[in-house]
Amino acid sequence: MESQPQPQPQPRRPRGFAATAAAAAASVSPTGTPSGSAGASTASSGKGKREREKEKERTKLRERHRRAITSRMLAGLRQYGNFPLPARADMNDVLAALAREAGWTVEPDGTTYRHSPPPQHQQHLGAFPVRSGESPLTATSLKNCSVKATLDCQQPVVRIDDSLSPASLDSVVIAERDTRSEKYPSTSPINSVEGLEADQLIQDVHSTEHDNDFTGTQYVPVYVKLSTGFINNFCQLADPDGVRQELSHMNSLNVDGVIVDCWWGIVECWNPQKYVWSGYRELFNYIREFKMKIQVVMAFHEYGRTDSADVLISLPNWILEIGKENQDIFFTDREGRRTTEFLSWGIDKERVLNGRTGVEVYFDFMRSFRTEFDDLFAEGLISAVEIGLGPSGELRYPSFSERMEWRYPGIGEFQCYDKYLQQHLQRAAKLRGHSFWARGPDNAGHYNSRPHETGFFCERGDYDSYYGRFFLHWYAQALMDHADNVLSLANLAFEETKIIVKIPAVYWWYKTSSHAAELTAGYYNPTNQDGYSPVFEVLKKHSVTVKFVCYGLQICSYENDEAFADPEGLSWQVLNSVWDRGLKVAGENTLSCYDKEGCLRIIETAKPRNDPDRRHFSFFVYQQPSPLVQGVICLPDLDYFIKCMHGDITGDLVP
């Protein structure tokens, strides 16, 4: 058979510093000297670019101001009007609530009507003629609506003159605020204008000209994650010279500390409760020489198993041997396929691991580490411990595993079909009084399905039925119970040491009603439900620091309209929910490279300029794609990034 020619990939449009370099190259003549016309063109282009950047920032400020006003309006409607608005209500929700208050019927698709036509005399009370099939809202029907008077009588906050320039318009929008709205507290702490004076906000407009000036901003420590592979499968330090070089390079960049993964599959590899820490002891001694802080990760998950992975770290061999006889200790999908990325939390309290439960196995490992390195805790060298609570160390189900041929932006699959989680589901259904609900959904598609292709996740699908709500609540509760059980013992093992929990960023399908990818990952967060607040209530109980995966990297990879992705919206919800509960937040990058725009977005997320409470990340973790000693530093200037996080630098990034 004759092979089909492969399509050639389209050349990528240069971004960030690549685009700058291309523009600079185009402005130089073949002899290496810029021509006069090219120089003038470059100057004109640079000026135009600066104006566009300023306009972009003014647009951002207008949007933040608009969101703050909307937030206060929604808060007032909830508090004083008893309107049952969703957690992330938009203006459609507000209009629907007002219409229902006035006696109208509003369908989910927006169809609005009365059950019976209004009296004939009312059809002439409106200010506008009535079209065929329409019935206007009358003064009588809205007499109980507290917003009506505001809509009819309130003077416009801003009178827009066509002669106003964009810059003057920004100033007017911010300065001419309606002081009556001050009595409504903001429900969105980030980017809120509550408590800020007009001159402060006007100053923010002018400060956009200096967006790269982070001098005097909050100090955010930066930790760099050590490359996986320095500790081999026999818990030996594989490359001492390479470790020393890498630590020396980090030290020269003024990094605050390093992140070290302590792999369960290496330390307790061969026999239960036989822990080998020798390689980590040697590694920690090297780090001590450079006087850098250490954050350790209790890594209870598998690493590698992909085509691009050059290192493979499995779960302990004795666990895999048990799994050959009892495969139900692993997460299982509807087709019966198992994943060995992490132990099912159905066995958290089942004595199936040589007489121990899953939670006891985790606790014994953590207690062994705490005892072995007691001297480093006493010195303060180990500053924090991150507890791995799922695949990739994140608190989630392994719903979108590449080993199961999942590809972005697939919705993933529920992972609750091992016999232990099924037993839990049966007990929950029986307690609910509906034993026939003791099953997973049979119309939820497969790993690479889209929500609209399934009966469960589609618009008005079964996810919002009585059964769907029961199942999703149980599925999310199992995840929260696992976190609660493990963190209770982690606080016992690491008393008075900062505990960190990593939260995933499942941002695709966020703009749909069901939020399908979040549901299969264990977060019950459709548009009519806040799925993160219950999780953070559990984490608040244990006073942990929440580490959230930041999306501000190569944003072009997320601009896929077909996935209805909204990483910024997800970040907004998560950070608000965490900060509202008084928990500390940290950040971590997820891809290998940033451009300038992504770098600045990360810094702005880490310490938002316009937050009146001056909240910021407690630290940031930079994951490097390869050892720094190889010279592969994907931030355009990692040194600049660190100084911006520390709040002691001004100027532009150097390409």
Image (cartoon, helix red, strand yellow):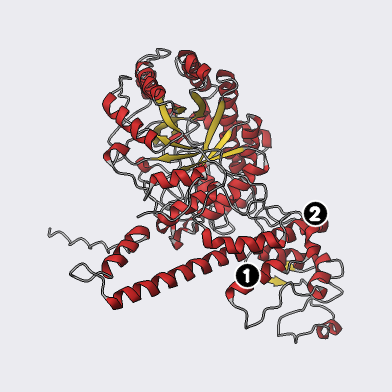
Residue at the disc numbered 2: 79
What whole-number distance in Å separates the C-alpha atoms at marks 1 and 2?
A: 30 Å
Q: x%, y% of residue 133? A: 71, 81
> What residue is at 27 percent from the left and 39 percent from the top?
630
Residue 543 higher or lower than 24, as above or below: above
Local secondary structure at mark 1: helix
Q: Would residue 344 be found to the left or right of residue 529 on screen?
A: left
Residue 545 higher or lower than 125, as above or below: above
Q: Nearer the viewer, residue 248 or 511?
A: 248
Local secondary structure at mark 2: helix
Under mark 1, the amino acid is Asp
Q: Are marks 1 and 2 in contact (CB under 8 Å)?
A: no
The C terminus: image quadrant: bottom left
Q: Which numbered disc, 1 or 2, marks the residue closer to the eye?
A: 1
Q: Nearer the viewer, residue 412 or 335?
A: 412
Q: Which badge, 1 or 2, is on the more N-terminal residue?
A: 2
Q: Is residue 239 visible?
A: no
Task: Decide: few, some or many residues near mark 2? Use Cα within 10 Å; few <14, some 14-19, many ≥20.
Answer: few
Q: x%, y% of residue 336? A: 41, 37
Residue 199 higher or lower than 252, as above or below: below
> What residue is at 60 percent from the left and 40 percent from the top?
437
Residue at the disc numbered 1: 170
Under mark 2, the amino acid is Gln
Q: Would residue 371 be found to the left or right of residue 13 on screen?
A: right
Q: Would residue 340 be found to the left or right of residue 356 on screen?
A: left
Task: Decide: few, some or many residues near mark 1? Use Cα within 10 Å; few <14, some 14-19, many ≥20.
Answer: some
> Residue 18: which numbered mark, if any?
none
> What residue is at 34 percent from the left and 76 percent from the top?
40
